[in-house]
Amino acid sequence: MKTKRENKSSVTSVRGKDKLMKELSGIALMLSSLFLIGAILSFHPDDEALFRTLPWHDISSPLSRDVAESIHNPFGLLGARLSAFFIRSFLGYPA
């Protein structure tokens, strides 16, 4: 049978892990929102014509690398795709 001290230490370690997970998920959320804001602010209308023929999942093929070199968005192909999606298809320029 566990003593009160052992029960208290196990509860404390669970709370510590829960707090760490909340902090890490908060940091990940902040970083992804900064990436998305930066991608939207650096939207360039000419980028959409470059990647229009590429499927969404095709990011690492040789053709995608060639397209990514000519994209104006500093966040690369993913940033150009996300900014075009949010500006053209989803929210418009108020995004």
Image (cartoon, rainbow, N blue to C red):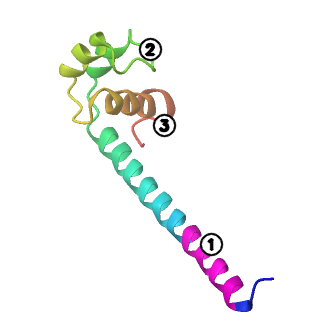
SS at circle 2: loop
Residue 93: horizontal and vertical position, in percent? 39, 37
Task: Please state if 91 lies on the left or on the right of 14 as rendered.
Answer: left
Residue type at mark 2 is: Pro
Label 1 element class: helix
Q: Amino acid at mark 3?
A: Leu
Query: What distance separates the C-alpha of mark 1 from that of mark 2?
Result: 43 Å
Where residue 13 appears, as percent x and y from the top left, is 59, 75
Q: Residue at x 55, y 74 (%)?
A: 16
Image quadrant where residue 4 sits: bottom right
**In the foreground, 87 or 22:** 22
- 10 Å crowding of disc 1: few (<14), some (14-19), many (20+): few
- Give the magenta part as a residue range: 5-18
Q: Which amino acid does the dot numbered 1 rest on?
A: Val
What residue is rendered at 37% in x and 53% in y?
31
Q: Which residue is mark 2?
A: 55
Looking at the image, is mark 1 or mark 3 nearer the viewer?
A: 1
Q: Which residue is mark 1?
A: 14
Could you say whether the residue bearing mark 3 is in a helix, strand or loop? loop
**What mark, if any, has residue 91 been given in the picture?**
3
Mark 2 neighbour class, 10 Å CA radius: few under 14, some 14 to 19, many 20 or more: few
- Does the segment drawn in magenta span residue 50? no
| Mark 1 → mark 3, Cα distance in angstroms | 41 Å
